[in-house]
């Protein structure tokens, strides 16, 4: 496993400012064999030109240029389809893995032959300068009672509170290593990340499907990466309109595909209160996100059909899945 081919899959859209450090980080990765697949979603800056000039020693770099912004979900699906590597690392252009990042994630896979491991994620920290204290970006993903998904430790000072390897609900799409058989098993209609999610929450949705099919997702604290995160809950007013639109749409899609009686009994009325608050906010203030509600209504038959397909494929007790709303992690 430690000598397995790993495909690094990245989706870009006007990422030229991040590419020099991204390419340097990939050059420094100790793991080989390696291939790098970048899907560019119609960048208007110098992203494509920078990639065309780039090379990574000991790794094959391929760039797939698209004429439209198909979003992270579809872009990642195209990157995954361009490779047959047994492992795929989803990596944002603004995420910089340490030299041993891939190796440590693979080692965590190898450490648990008794588990059906589908993905392993590492400890991400925010970019910092000088003597600034380390601030966490993500230590795996957790669910909340109002059906939000948060990166564990996000914006907290890193004082060792996530130093233990654990089972976690999910991993951020910014830097998580996936086992290809798990992705193929969880795929719906050939889609690993569901295209209708476009951008935002697509990694949480995939985490649901992996767990519903019985795959474990692990957190490896010694695998370190830096991440310059753009989208944070507190920055909503500064986010582009299309990002907020997809955030609203995907909140309800996530519920539509994965809500069950078991999760309803665990979360009680918390999601409903937030649902009403989100709808009121969109109708009264964030008018640019109204098309999200329209999309959900127009595509309701597609959503219901896909929900049936997803729920028919669940192979673990729904009470076990619902328990993730009550815990941040689970010991290995």
Image: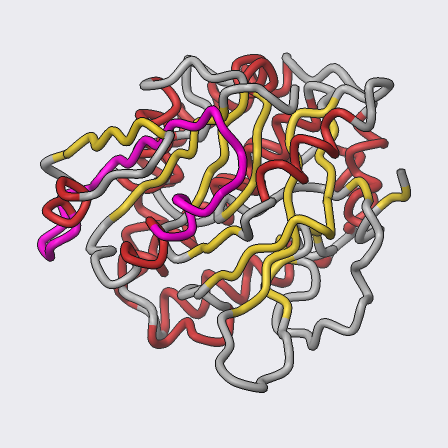
Nearest the viewer among 207 and 237 is 207
From the top left corner, tell me how far across and down residue 180 is, in percent: 54, 18
Q: Residue at x 43, y 70 (%)?
A: 281
- Quadrant in the rendering for residue 2: top right
Q: Based on the picture, tell me whether residue 179 belongs to the magenta stretch.
A: no
Judge left or right: residue 220 versus residue 297. right
Residue at left offset 87%, top offset 44%: 330
On the image, which quarter does residue 107 sit in? top right
The magenta segment is 24-47
Q: Quadrant of the C terminus?
A: top right
Q: How many marks?
A: 0
Q: Is residue 69 visible?
A: no
Q: Residue furthest bottom?
A: 131
Picture coordinates of residue 64, whole percent (x, y): 20, 30
Write the residue at 68% across / 55% down.
Answer: 139
Please tell me which residue lies in front, 116 or 26: 26
Give the residue drawn at x 78%, y 33%. Answer: 321
Place of residue 184 in the rendered image (x, y in percent of width and height, measured from the top left): 52, 14
Judge whether residue 5 can be spotted in this image.
yes
């Amino acid at each position: 496993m430690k000598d397995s081919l790993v495909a690094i899959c990245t989706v870009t859209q006007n990422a030229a400012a991040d590419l020099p450090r991204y390419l340097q980080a990939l050059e420094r990765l100790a793991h080989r064999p390696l291939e790098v697949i970048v899907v560019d979603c119609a960048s208007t800056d110098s992203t494509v030109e920078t990639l065309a000039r780039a090379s990574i020693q000991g790794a094959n770099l391929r760039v797939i240029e698209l004429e439209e912004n198909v979003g992270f979900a579809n872009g990642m699906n195209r990157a995954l389809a361009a490779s047959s590597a047994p492992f795929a690392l989803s990596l944002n252009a603004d995420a910089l893995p340490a030299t041993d990042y891939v190796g440590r994630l693979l080692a965590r896979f190898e450490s648990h032959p008794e588990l059906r491991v589908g993905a392993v994620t590492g400890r991400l920290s925010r970019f910092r300068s000088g003597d600034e204290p380390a601030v966490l970006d993500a230590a795996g993903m957790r669910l909340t009672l109002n059906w939000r998904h948060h990166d564990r430790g996000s914006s907290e000072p890193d004082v060792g509170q996530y130093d233990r390897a654990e089972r976690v609900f999910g991993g951020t799409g910014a830097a998580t290593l996936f086992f290809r058989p798990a992705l193929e098993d969880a795929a719906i209609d050939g889609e690993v990340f569901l295209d209708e999610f476009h951008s935002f929450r697509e990694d949480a949705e995939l985490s649901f499907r992996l767990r519903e099919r019985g795959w474990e997702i692990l957190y490896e604290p010694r695998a370190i990466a830096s991440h310059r995160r753009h989208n944070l809950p507190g920055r909503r007013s500064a986010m582009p309109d299309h990002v907020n639109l997809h955030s609203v749409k995907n909140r309800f899609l996530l519920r539509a595909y994965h809500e069950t009686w078991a999760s309803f009994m665990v979360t009680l009325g918390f999601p409903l209160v937030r649902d009403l608050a989100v709808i009121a906010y969109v109708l009264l203030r964030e008018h640019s996100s109204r098309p999200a509600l329209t999309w959900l209504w127009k595509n309701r038959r597609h959503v219901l059909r896909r929900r049936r397909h997803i729920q028919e494929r669940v192979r673990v007790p729904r009470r076990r899945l619902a328990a993730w709303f009550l815990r941040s992690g689970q010991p290995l």
